[in-house]
Image (cartoon, grey):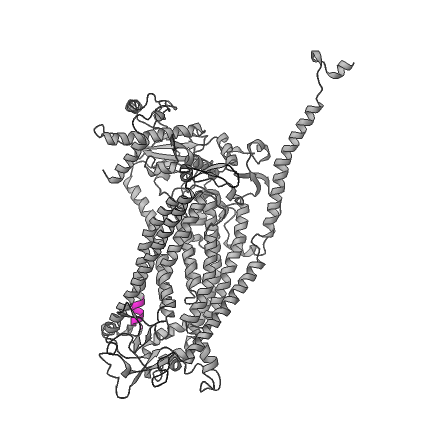
Amino acid sequence: MSDVDSDEEQLEMEEFPDGDEEFCAQSYIPNYGSVPGEQEQLASELGPYCNEATYLFGPKSGVEFDGNEDSAFFADGQRRIDFVLAYEEEQRKPSDQKRMRSILNRKRKRALFQENLTKVGLQIEGTRSILDFRTIFLKLHAPWEVLCRYAELLHIKLPLHSNDIKQKSSTFNCITKIFSVDEDKIPPEAEYFTAPFEMDRIKSFHTTDRDAFFTPATRSRIVKYILNRCEYKRGKPSKFGITKLLDSKTYKAAYNLHDCKFNLKSSDPSCPNERYLLYKEWAHPKNFYKLQPLDLIRKYFGEKIGIYFAWLGFYTGMLAIAGFTGLICFIFGILTRDDSTWSQEVCDPAIGGSIIMCPQCDRECTYWRLNITCQSSRKLAIFDNHGTLVYAIFMGIWVTVFLEFWKRRQAELEYEWDTVELEQEEPCRPEYEAKCTIPRKNPITQEEEMVPHSACEKCMLIFCVGSTVIFWISLIIASVVAIIVYRLAVFFEFSVNLGKAMDNDLEPLKDYLTPQIATSVTASLINFVFIMILNILYERVAIWITDFELPRTQTDYENSLTLKMFLFQFVNYYSSCFYIAFFKGKVVGYPGKPVYWLGRFRNEECDPGGCLVELSTQLLIVMGGKAIWNNVQEILIPWLKNLIGRYCTKSSENVLPRWEQDYQLQPISKLGLFYEYLEMVIQFGFATIFVASFPLAPLLALINNIIEIRVDAWKMTTQYRRIIPAKAQDIGAWLPILHGVAVFAAVTNALIIAFTSDMIPRLVYYWTLSVQPYGEHSSPTMHGYINSTLSVFRVTDFSNLSKPIVVPYWFDPATDTTCRYRDLRYPPDHPLQYHHSLYFWHVMAAKLAFIIVMEHVVFGVNFLVSYWIPDVPEKIKEQIKREKYLTQKLLHEAHLTDWHSKTTNASKAPVKGPGGLKSKDMDV
């Protein structure tokens, strides 16, 4: 037996020790579907622990399957199945007393749990699995009275009055109709004004059809609320909640049902076939260009899933604008690269071919000619041009426009989906309530309430959580340092051996695969592997410390976990890009006095054209690799698990009931959409933070998102059990994170253009140093730029540690007395030889001025855009006012009118005198 099983059994024995009179005082609900005679055996086994066993549903051994594979009702065909619990009957071996006690303890927990479910009003029907005789399914039904009671408790908004405000038709309807879902197949939902449900005023609500008054999603949400708060062990502290029973394997699954098969329309007239419609009109790849049926998604999966797909669809639509503009910028770079004077000078044999460059590593590296970097300079000209500068400013404004218009769209969905006042009605998490043992005075109500932590414990908790997060972020930084050391070491090897390896068979690649490119590609691949491994490890740590933190509500839990995971992933994914953009090649010294890492590794330099191409390569590998890995993982893992599950449970039975078909599907993760949001927000960072170096990033994000929407839709409708509906007002903590990324992107793009690209040095040379009196030309030009930006070094000034051992055959020490390197320093024999020149300080001042100007332009335009675009559309404000008016009129004023009428009638009623005579008769 494994250690995990032993721990579970020990926990169960602690929960139900010998002589637990509290449990024995309760009636026992049997395991439904027991084989004949097994109930009597179970009663005898429980004899030493309990004096009586009351079977609330009699000796019936289970409900037989009627052959209707799409039925979502009890055997009577009337009561809807709102939830399903599944468990396996364990085999009992009398010789194994420890195992016997574990089995009995699980049975006791199920017994008390199911008894308490019936006490709150839920109805239970049990049946045995067709494929596996040991598996028992408990079908739960919430009667009308239970639904009404909990709808009032949870402040669920229900239809009050049809929306009588006329909607204005959009001028773009003729365009959007092409991309919209066919309304004949998925008709639009009827619009109602809604109000929190009140049982006393039920007549004011739109209750013409009781069966349709509570949607299946609302019914499932109510039952899940009951399951989360139902006790399975009484006492202090009491233990409750289906989550803990699932964790302890007392139940194998708890889920709500799909309404039919995804690929076959049900012939049952009571089946709405919403799953089939979602697959055909939403999840199928043929619909990649169509808008999403958000109302049907929300109706079937709940508001939380609906708001995710609404945000993802809106983000993808906005990416179409950014991606198309980035493609134009990229095409502009391709068309103008042959007009780039500085790139032509690098490739020109008379200019670049005559410039001898200094070795880029000690001793083993040798001199080389500048024109061997011709291909990399041509590629650099595609990305490093004036179009990229304009595009970076455009993206800084695009981010704000995207976020502001999303707020408007979110406000529309909040109203349409009745989540405007959700924060006031969200209940506490069961895990939080179970740990509330410390009394505290509420400063608002001035009443005593129970909290899980004292003030001192909370401070210690914050310290421990913060220390853990800082430790793991430090671990990422350590891995980045390891990658840097790898780059420094392997660049030396590539510089020495790569040219020799390509002398024969790989000669055509010699101009493309330089030591810098080889180092960048291999380091990026290794860094990507490190990222994936650290993500897996930290994910578990983040969940553990968030559970330990014990947030009050599910929203607080997800927000806390969101912040921890994003901080980690931000450093994990972007740290290598920041190194290339802002650190590589910046502090390298000069050939006679290079800077060393750890006293051993010489700091690596950028290509003579700059580090922008390397940064683009890093982005392409990490961003593309992440997208491919995630999509393959999301498709293959659930598909393979379901395939293996179907193979292992292969049976001659062709018809399975709906609850058993769904049981074979994969359960959704506890965190649900958390990883989907995280994936998209990290992608949003790649598409905005480094867009100045890679204008195609938004286009790649657009292509990925078009696939992502259909992949997520496909797996939710075909591979996973139906997600338990949940309310969500917005995208939660992700919105302020997106705002933070937007601000960070504006600053980062300004820094990339200033310090990573050569845009500013080229502009300074063009407008200042190329013309008289500083230059030789009468009008601004880029001719001579390469020569002016490469400093001169005297070869006799090499130290013995740096002097190359071998020199190329074309290098003549008698005539070639100097070499060039990428920097702006004074030449030898100058009074300030090898110090930064005046040109360097001019360029530095221009870079700082550019950063200030660009940031002020972007932030100024963003402020104006935010001011001009209101967060809530005017039509939504009108509808909210209309809804409040109707709520006041139909509920509150109507209640007062009824009360006033009753009071008036009572005062007008004739008073009877003695003998039952009316007062008027007495007067006569």
Q: x%, y% of residue 481?
A: 31, 63
Farthest residue, direction bottom: 814
Residue 455 sits above or below residue 751 on the image: above
Farthest residue, direction left: 95
The residue nearer to you, when weighing 204 against 859, is 859
The residue nearer to you, when weighing 485 against 785, is 485
The residue nearer to you, when weighing 63 against 915, is 915
Q: What stretch is highlighted in magenta?
A: 512-520
On-image quarter of the C terminus: top right
Residue 795 sits above or below residue 324 on the image: below
Q: Can residue 409 be seen in this view?
A: yes
Residue 835 sits above or below residue 906 on the image: below
In the picture, measured across the screen, residue 759 lies left or right of residue 51, that is right
Most prominent secondary structure in the magenta stretch?
helix
Q: x%, y% of residue 610?
A: 37, 73
On-image quarter of the N terminus: top left
Magenta-colored stretch includes residue 70? no
Q: How many labels does the image show?
A: 0
Magenta-colored stretch includes residue 514? yes
Farthest residue, direction top: 915
Q: x%, y% of residue 547?
A: 38, 44
* Figure quadrant of residue 265: top left
Residue 865 sits above or below residue 363 on the image: above
The residue nearer to you, when weighing 771 against 207, is 771
In the picture, measured across the screen, residue 897 lies left or right of residue 691, that is right
Q: x%, y% of residue 109?
A: 34, 31
Farthest residue, direction front: 456
Q: Can residue 655 be seen in this view?
A: no
